[in-house]
Image (spheres, helix red, strand yellow):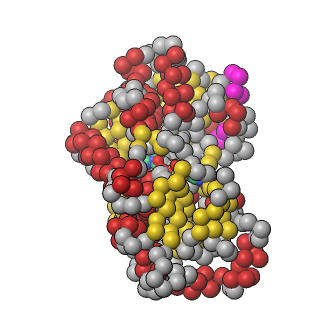
Amino acid sequence: MSGITRRTFLKSAGTVGALSLLGCTVAPSKGAKAKVVIIGGGYGGSTAAKYLKLFDPSLDVTLIEKRKTYYSCPGSNEVISGWHDLGWLVRSREGLTTRLGVNLVRAKVVEIDPQKRIVTLKDGSEIPYDRLVLSPGVDMRFDAIEGYDLKTSKLIPHAWKAGKQTTLLLNQLKAMRDGGVVIITAPAGPYRCPPGPYERASLIANYLKRSKPRSKVIIVDAKTQFSKQALFLKGWQDLYPGMVEWVSSEKVGQIDHINPSKLIVATEFNNFRASVLNVIPPQKAGWLARKTELADHSRWCPVDPRSFESTLIPNIHIIGDACIATPMPKSAFSANSQAKICAAAIVDLLNGRQPGPPSLINHCYSFLAPDYAISINGVYEYSVAERQLVATGGGETPMDADRGREAEFARSWRENITADTFEG
Ligand SMILES: Cc1cc2nc3c(=O)[nH]c(=O)nc-3n(C[C@H](O)[C@H](O)[C@H](O)COP(=O)(O)OP(=O)(O)OC[C@H]3O[C@@H](n4cnc5c(N)ncnc54)[C@H](O)[C@@H]3O)c2cc1C
């Protein structure tokens, strides 16, 4: 927090109780357009900007994004498999400006002052807000695995943020000899895209089957079970028999360290030597959220799911991977759902209305081959008694379902979420 600590701020704001929903609402002066600033133009932030303008075109909405090019993580495993070029992952937000009038600013936000309600950009310029939405995504925890830090990640990719890292892993797979071993380490939850490591293993196997059929993929997992497990295990048996091996921490213990020069993953009871190593480390809320003391001891940001307003600092809403929205998984679909609830709640709050109890959904598809996909979905509602979201429905692709049709649905989902998030 700029100049003040969260503790000082809370003192000056009264008690934590004063932060609840309408308790600390700031209304713009009469006649002035309310200013909503959004930091992070990924799945959460772009959807929030779009829906704020759709719900109330009179709002002054500014979306600030630090990167020139945004590469979508959904689809990045397909790029690694060689189905598409990296450029296929680029998402443009121009329609948000031309069709809806969102102000797009390309800059890194380096500071948030919650008391003055100002964000400061890297060049020192300041942008004021009435309400702030933060969707900064995740950072890798480079202190979590001995031997794996930021510098090592330039040689041994995590590829858990799409772009350069995706290309690095793709090129290493291309350079690998036939008969090589690809090792993926999967973290304990919560992390971005729970089924992602297993989709990645499947699509690397798909590439290897086509190009290097004597090779194999091993997943060294910090967990003892994983998302869509039975469906993935069946898919690997159907499509890539003997090529994909999942190793539970129950069997080999937790990862002790990585030896980067020898490409060895050392667990408590075993050593695994890779030809290509893909380390997916544990994660945490993006830097700006942690710097602003919006994250708690878990390194993620607690929010009131009725509005996604921080329970720690008023007038700031956190959506997407950075927030704690348990039991929702950290996914682009979740970020998109949360952004809409958040946008509607902000319009309510700015107009002195109490946001209603929300209902959210998530549906995650995973490809195992171009004509073979599986999915999991969930419905989440706000429980007044538990003061958090609870799962009220959901399920997985049935074992006997047509995987080809699921693949069609997965492609169509991607087109729809891209349009719904990034196009005006
Ligand atoms: C391999 C892989 C596959 C996946 N597949 C799927 C899938 O099939 N379906 C699905 O639903 N989800 C999928 N996901 C998950 C999905 O990518 C994330 O859940 C989603 O991107 C979260 O959106 P977000 O807005 O929280 O973060 P992001 O999309 O990462 O956006 C955050 C943005 O904030 C910007 N930013 C951060 N800090 C600042 C700052 N200080 N100033 C300005 N800008 C800043 C960043 O540059 C970034 O553009 C996948 C993820 C991976 C890794």
Residue drawn at the location 63% of the way across and 68% of the way down: 118
The answer to whether any part of residue 306 appears in the image is: no
Q: In this view, does 405 lie to the left or right of 350?
A: left
Q: Which of 101 and 194 is in front in this view?
A: 101
Residue ID at (47%, 51%) = 42
Q: Give the camera-side residue of 56 and 281.
A: 56
Does residue 346 show up? yes
Q: In which quarter of the image is residue 262?
A: top right
Residue occupying the point 54% across, 72% down? 131
> Which of 64 and 172 lies nearest the eye of the viewer?
64
Coordinates of residue 244 in the picture (x, y in percent): 45, 29
Residue sitting at 69 percent across and 37 percent down?
150
Instruction: Measuring from the top left, give residue 352's x and y in whole percent.
Output: 46, 86
On the image, the x and y values in percent for residue 69 come to 49, 41
Pick the quarter of the image with the N terminus.
bottom right
Q: Does the magenta stretch include residue 163?
A: no
Q: Position of residue 195 (x, y in %)?
A: 45, 46
Vertical comparison of 267 with 340: above or below: above
Q: Magenta residues?
A: 253-262
Q: In which quarter of the image is residue 343?
A: bottom left
| Quarter of the image that includes the C terminus | bottom left
On screen, residue 29 versus residue 144, left or right, reads: left
- The answer to whether residue 260 is magenta is yes
Q: Is residue 70 above or below residue 302?
A: above
Q: Nearer the viewer, residue 52 or 84?
A: 52
